[in-house]
Image (tube, rainbow, N blue to C red):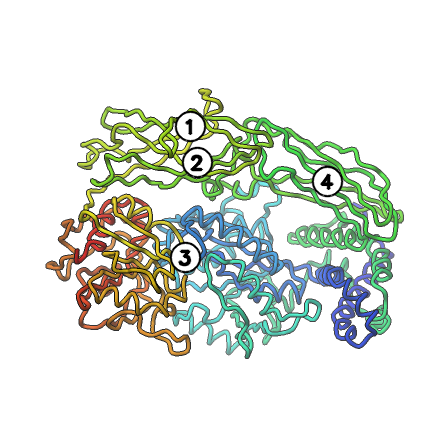
Amino acid sequence: MKHTSTTERAALRAMLSFLLCCAVALCGAQGAFAQQSGATTARLKAQDDESVALHQAMLDLWNPWTVMCVAAHPDDEDGATLTVLRRKQGAHTVTVFSTYGEGGQNAIGPELYEELGAIRARETLAAAEIQGSEPWFLGLRDFGFSKSAAEAFSVWGHDEALRRMVLKIRSLHPDVIITNHDTLSGHGHHQATGRLVLEAFDAAADASRFPEQLREPSVTLWQPQRLFVRVNYEEGTGSRDLEEAAERAGKIVSINPNERDNVRGTTYAEQALAALHQHASQGPWPQAVPEKGAPIIRYRLAREAKDAVPLPAHAQTFLDGLQLPPSISGRFGKMDNKETQPLEELQSMDLRLMREQLFVAFSGSREAVRTKDDNFTEKYSEPHLRLMYKRLSQTLALLSSIDATLTSQDAALVPNAAGRFFLNIRNSGAHAATIRAVYFRERLGVRQLKVQSQLAAHSTVGAKVETSIPSGEESNVPHAAHLYDGKLFGREFDAIVNVVVNGKAFSIPVATRVDIAPAVEISRVTPSPLVLTPATIEKPAAFTLRLVNHQSAPFAGAITAGAQTFAGTKPKFILVESGGRDAKGFSLAANETRDLKLHLVGPPVIIDSVRAGKHLAANSLTLTLTRDFAKAPINTQKIPVVYSDARVPARLRVGYVRSFDDTLRDALAALGVEAKELTIDDVRSGELKNFDTIIIDNRGYQAHPELIAANARLLDFARDGGTLIVCYHKANEWNPDEKKRRPQLAPFPIQLGTARVTDENAPVTFAEPQSALLHSPNEITKEDFDGWIQERGLYYPKEWDAYYSAPFATSDAGEAALRGGLLAADYGRGHYIYTSMVWYRQLRAGIPGAYRFFANMISYGH
């Protein structure tokens, strides 16, 4: 490689000095704009977006450092600090999430588990775009709330989790790592993530750890320089001594998110809140930053590399004192105010003229950054050079006013068919350009596209691109089925546009991701699992199938069904339309999405040996979709079939207020209960006496705040002889609050806390064995709590009135028994039940014992 010339170094140094001046000028210009004439202000207003992009690009070129934020779940990231690092300091920011957050609750819809994880992953992409960060995922399983790191590692596998964390450090090359999570406090996933970061900090630089990773492209041994842990974020006391020691040593870094970003016209805290709002499934979030501002964020230095430049005492940023290796430090020049242009001149400069002058300065800079000396041996130099070369290229394209986009003409691509794309190249600048070459990357290589070579000023050229999608290309839909295999976000297609402007050549990379899907997708089947009880086992099963035609042509097909049991019989089924007619087939228009309602009739799916629990595996029903009754399947969907010996009184009438999903609807239907979903108007003015039982779904008062004002009607219903069941709420959604005008919602006081039982196998004891809830109409035993998933209950009451009975108790190992999982009280001529148990997860999963206890609750008093 050639040596960097003195002329190149001088040019680069002058350019970067000039660059910083421009960045400062653009920041200051926002205030100056208000003092200028209306015409000038209007002109500058139209340039706002360009100014922001240009400001960020120039700011980025002053910061060669990468900061990695590590978080256990989406929305655990420190969005405010990430925003400050990127938008104020120009650092390259990446965020690594241990999980996709699929074990959490869903505040906006019915999706749970892998379906929720796919949603949260895309919410994270949207939040990261606002923060200016790049999100990455380790793909460890989120199995719900955990109280210890030991439990997390028992599911994740310590070595596997560490391997994944080390790989991300070795491939993303962070100079600094920050995390909200200490090793002792909070959620068990948080504790485990905090421990992984500490271990991986040094393991990533150890050639004896996971050496197979080093054979992968762009993966190198890497030693981060500093690790910071947020002070008291988890509200625990385990790390207090470390925090106090860091305070005494001056090793605390504070971030003020309330500073104003003059370029964007908002504070960094406001930008971070906007990013947090993208995590909608985990809301609701505050609508505005507090009037007094967001709290100051504080981090303690937790670890430094052995050969790192020490963090200066009372440092202002995580990056203070960091130095590039000597072999490349000169490539970025030194600050020299004598070479900068006066700020006054820059503030009055037309944006177009500023672009042109910067373009000239930039165009000769990339090789100086990319070039290395023959004796270039610095261990940690290449990633910094690659980052800055990439940033220089992006800035050069921005200054040229030439951009490109690559879009798929189809929402999803189908194997053994053509993938259609459109490449658009736009020149919004004042100078003509030459398109030297355009390359499109396909699975088997790269091909050059034919594109008009001359691109006049203020013009656009385009090119249609077709590529064959191989027949063996694996689908990544539905997304929930591909949460852990690396295909969640589809396949990437990209192109490179080589451009020449004023004799200066540069490249514009462009990429897009597209789902790969079968010709027709069975995107959803409800109900699934199919739960059968004595009231429904002999009745036809009704399903709704959501079908998506991913083709740009009509599709005609058929659906067949087969049952799988393990007792030697395979019943046959007949599919019929909802109206009772035989379903000979169906058709879909091009790109149509449609719900198909089907009834399944024939011999019972479940046979006696299965009812007795002697089957070797779960029974299942398989739906197979074919084209025009052809034998080869287009798609298949397996539906688990579960039997629960849960009985309810005849002619029981149940109303329910739905929150976020249809679990209550499906569970009541499985029990053969006459049920109706109630609106808030129904509660306010309806004939509630027509129901025996009314259920308020999980967090119903939060999902429908107007229900609070109508709560007296519900209590009257119970007092007059009905049974009112309220499922779990959070304390801030339930406990009396004068400021929120929320009274006590139960007939006798209940005060919720934060306690929960996270072990789904936690033993259950019957504290009041005589309770009717344990005997009628189903005799409940401890076996009915077997096979539960994820957890027992959450947000348990911490106080309740003596009128309530608490028939059973449970607790995690080593903790005091919690008796508030179900509270029942007689009220007037009726009954009231509050339950913190996670019935919705168990009912949705088809846990037989949960159906038996649920049947007793809705039958209570009837």
Q: Nearer the viewer, residue 834 or 49?
A: 834
Label 1, label 3: how far apart the Cα atoms are: 43 Å
Horizontal and vertical percent position of residue 481: 45, 40
- Of circles 1 and 2, which is in front? 2
Residue at 62% across / 45% down in the picture? 218
Q: Secondary structure at mark 3?
A: helix
- Verify CB contact (< 8 Å) between mark 1 and mark 2: yes
Identify the element where label 1 is drawn.
Answer: strand
How many tags in the picture?
4
Q: Which label belongs to residue 559?
A: 1
Disc 3 versus disc 4: nearer the observer? 4
Q: CA distance from mark 4 to mark 1?
A: 39 Å
Dot 2 falls on a residue whose secondary structure is strand
Image quadrant for the C terminus? Answer: bottom left
Which residue shows up at 56% across the image and 40% down it?
A: 490
- Mark nearest the camera among 1 and 3 is 1
Outermost residue toward the left?
770
Q: Are marks 1 and 3 in contact (CB under 8 Å)?
A: no
Q: Name the residue tied to disc 3.
A: 189
- Report the residue marked by disc 4: 423
Q: Which residue is mark 2?
A: 596
